Image (cartoon, grey):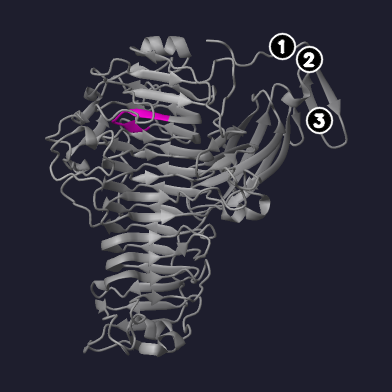
């Protein structure tokens, strides 16, 4: 393998100025030294913090940023993952044209909510550091949204309720929410009664209105059948709509388009509500039009809905969607593929499969903008589970499509509050989607996908097409029954896969992507339809700094060439896709792990494994048409590692990812031996 960069150090000298110290090596190009710029703190979430450090220089790409952290009152520092180097990666397609700045980005993971932390960043470069080489900042993680302790309380009862009431009481939600709740033409005349901190307690019953009945007081708007909420709370004092605790509260949309429209209402809080019989249960934003901030939805149930919670407005931010049950309308008894090629179309006579399939339910949660958290939810029977919106170029950047105006290919500073950054998806149980359980498509920096259970997905469980710089972290996720393959990252730049259990073929096209400590075992899934090749691990990368090591691979008995590594010639840093330009990638395929490692330098410390590393996980075969549509339950499987198996103690230490490992080294895959498995789904 040819080295990418050769640096010859002739001597070392130091140049002092009143503001900075430059350490350089004589003979190096000045542009190889790194010059430090602004450190940006992204919106904190409950358990993670994201950062961006902009730089100049470092043309030879050998600078690094080590990260450590501590609670503000503590003395000892703990290591975190280093920041990921980004440097001009280009993501180009018919929908995107983005070039990443010269910068570092990354996250400190798994912290405590509502806690002050100090974060320390140390820049190093063999060629010299110009400016501040060390920065320390104090940041507070976000608190979980809760109702205010001193807000006014309004009691709501359903139409026809005849029991005793708590006062002040109202019939129907809008009579409490607004001063006026007339029906008919007067429905829009009311203005919000509620103010920050107020709590609307909704008592047990069915809240369903005939949207075609003119003059129905206290209900939804006529004809639309929608609850339009327009009052703003604050982060500390949301406006709360909460079940009173005396029985199930059901809001039924009677088949309408949108049950709740909160686009004009910041910091609305729902808890303990059942939403049903509607296309959009909570419509919270629409691209380029309007959208909410600070929406919270907790301990609620969505059933017979097309979409659970939706915003693709870039100004939406800081949603908290946790401990909910989402049930779509798609067939719960069988797996259905949305695309007729190459997977489902190669089989004749798959029971009831037609193309395109009816998309009775689209997505449980779709988001755009910064600071969102979607955690501990159960999601079943949607086309997609949780998505970052495939938005197109972020606001402020201009795509370079034919005939389009030229402009910045990264958002200018005045648009940074609209970037899709600092987004968390963790501890969700997602099953039976036509397509993907989670899509990070169109996201920018510091999207964290942690400890999720992905089971029964016709397409790909790890979807990043594209990522616009990253990092997107996929950490300790389990994915099983993926007949379309495990990963889709066409055009992604800046993705890391750490300690995942990936039980299907991994293929795709990307740049600046990295695998460590994963278990990757095949199920004879569909070939990479962009390359029409079947590989267990088939990677095409535009950058020779994409990397893979300390993984467990296999088996792939029916694949002639299990390993593929396409990249530019090894003496070329990168060759990015651009309009009218086809990257000059060299195709390299290998029959064995040993041949692949020797030729590419990748996975030198990786090992071969079989399904016998697990306590109880049967191998699946996507070519078995009799079982192709089977739905599996994670409760019937056991993804723990057998003692003394080939995956034990074969990983590398990754700060904050492998903390607390039990043997001589971390184990491969999502579950460390001797450590309790994560909880997936609602915490009740």
Horizontal and vertical percent for residue 646? 29, 19
Disc 2 + disc 1, Cβ < 8 Å: yes
How far, Cα to Cα, is label 2 from label 3? 18 Å
Q: Residue at x 59, y 18 (%)?
A: 572
- Residue 365: quarter of image: bottom left
Is 571 positioned to the left or the right of 382 in the image?
A: right
Label 2: element kind: loop
Which residue is at a point 36% across and 75% down the rendered structure image? 226
Mark 1 and mark 3: span between their CA atoms? 22 Å
Q: Tell us which disc is closer to us: 2 or 3.
A: 2
* Residue designated by label 3: 21
Q: Residue 314 appears at what percent x and percent y?
A: 53, 57
Say which of 386 and 532 sits in front.
Answer: 532
Query: Mark on residue 27?
Result: 2
Front residue of 177/257: it is 257
Name the secondary structure under disc 3.
Answer: strand
Rendering quarter of residue 163: bottom left
**Magenta region: which residues?**
500-508
The vertical placement of 237 against 53, above or below, is below
User: Can you give x and y, in whole percent of width and height, for residue 435 in the image?
Assistant: 31, 44
Distance in Å between CA atoms under marks 2 and 1: 7 Å
Please report the residue visible at 37 percent of the width from the left and 45 percent of the height from the top. 438
Q: Is residue 5 visible?
A: yes
Q: Is residue 226 above or below residue 398?
A: below
């Amino acid at each position: 393998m040819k080295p990418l960069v050769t640096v010859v150090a002739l001597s070392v000298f130091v140049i002092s100025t009143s503001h900075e110290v430059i350490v350089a090596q004589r003979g190096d190009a000045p542009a190889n030294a790194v010059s430090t710029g602004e450190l940006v703190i992204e919106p904190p979430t409950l358990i993670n913090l994201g950062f961006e450090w902009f730089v100049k220089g470092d043309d030879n790409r050998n600078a690094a940023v080590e990260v450590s952290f501590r609670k503000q009152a503590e003395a000892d520092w703990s290591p975190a993952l280093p920041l990921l180097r980004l440097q001009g990666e280009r993501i180009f397609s018919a929908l995107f044209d983005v070039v990443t700045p010269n910068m570092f980005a990354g996250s400190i993971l798994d912290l405590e909510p509502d806690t002050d932390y100090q974060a320390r960043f140390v820049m190093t470069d063999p060629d010299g550091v110009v400016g501040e080489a060390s920065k320390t900042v104090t940041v507070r993680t976000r608190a979980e949204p809760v109702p205010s302790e001193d807000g006014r309380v309004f009691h709501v009862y359903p139409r026809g309720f005849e029991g005793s009431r708590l006062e002040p009481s109202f019939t129907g939600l809008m009579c409490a929410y607004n001063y006026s709740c007339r029906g008919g033409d007067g429905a829009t005349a009311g203005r919000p009664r509620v103010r920050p901190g107020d709590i609307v307690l909704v008592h047990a019953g069915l809240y369903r209105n005939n949207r075609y009945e003119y003059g129905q007081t206290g209900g939804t708007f006529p004809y639309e059948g929608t609850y339009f909420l327009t009052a703003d709370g604050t982060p500390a004092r949301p406006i709360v709509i909460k079940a009173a605790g005396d029985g199930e509260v059901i809001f039924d949309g009677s088949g309408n388009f949108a049950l709740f429209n909160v686009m004009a209402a910041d910091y609305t809080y729902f808890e303990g509500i059942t939403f049903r019989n509607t296309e959009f249960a909570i419509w919270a934003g629409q691209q380029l039009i309007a959208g909410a901030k600070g929406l919270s939805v907790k301990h609620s149930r969505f059933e017979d809905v097309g979409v659970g919670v939706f915003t693709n407005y870039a100004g939406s931010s800081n949603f908290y969607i946790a401990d909910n049950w989402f049930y779509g309308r798609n067939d719960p008894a069988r797996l259905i593929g949305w695309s007729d090629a190459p997977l489902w179309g190669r089989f004749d006579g798959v029971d009831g499969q037609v193309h395109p399939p009816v998309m009775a339910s689209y997505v449980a949660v779709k988001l755009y903008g910064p600071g969102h958290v979607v955690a501990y939810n159960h999601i079943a029977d949607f086309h997609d589970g949780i998505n970052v919106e495939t938005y197109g170029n972020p606001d402020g950047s201009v795509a370079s499509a034919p005939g389009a105006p030229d402009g910045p290919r990264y958002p200018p500073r005045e648009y940074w509050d609209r970037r899709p950054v600092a987004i968390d998806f963790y501890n969700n149980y997602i099953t039976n989607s036509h397509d993907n359980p989670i899509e990070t498509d169109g996201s920018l920096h510091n999207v964290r996908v942690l400890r999720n259970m992905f089971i029964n997905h016709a397409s790909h469980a790890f979807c990043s097409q594209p990522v616009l710089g990253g990092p997107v972290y996929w950490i300790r996720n389990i994915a099983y029954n993926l007949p379309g393959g495990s990963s889709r990252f066409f055009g992604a730049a800046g993705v890391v896969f750490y300690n995942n259990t990936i039980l299907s073929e991994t293929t795709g096209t990307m740049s600046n992507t990295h695998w460590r400590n994963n278990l990757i075992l095949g199920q004879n899934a569909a070939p990479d339809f962009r390359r029409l090749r079947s590989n267990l691990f088939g990677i095409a990368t535009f950058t020779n700094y994409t990397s893979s090591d300390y993984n467990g691979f296999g088996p792939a008995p029916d694949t002639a060439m299990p390993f593929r590594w396409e990249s530019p010639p090894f003496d070329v840093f990168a060759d990015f896709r651009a309009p009218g330009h086809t990257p000059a990638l060299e195709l390299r395929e290998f029959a064995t792990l040993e041949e692949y490692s020797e030729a590419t330098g990748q996975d030198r410390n990786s090992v071969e494994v079989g399904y016998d590393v697990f306590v109880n996980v049967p191998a699946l075969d996507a070519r078995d048409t009799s079982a192709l549509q089977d739905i599996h339950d994670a409760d019937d499987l056991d993804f723990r590692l057998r003692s003394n198996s080939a995956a034990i103690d074969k990983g590398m230490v990754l700060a904050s990812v492998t903390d607390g490992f039990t043997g001589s080294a971390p184990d491969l895959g999502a579950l460390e031996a001797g450590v309790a498995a994560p909880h997936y789904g609602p915490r009740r």
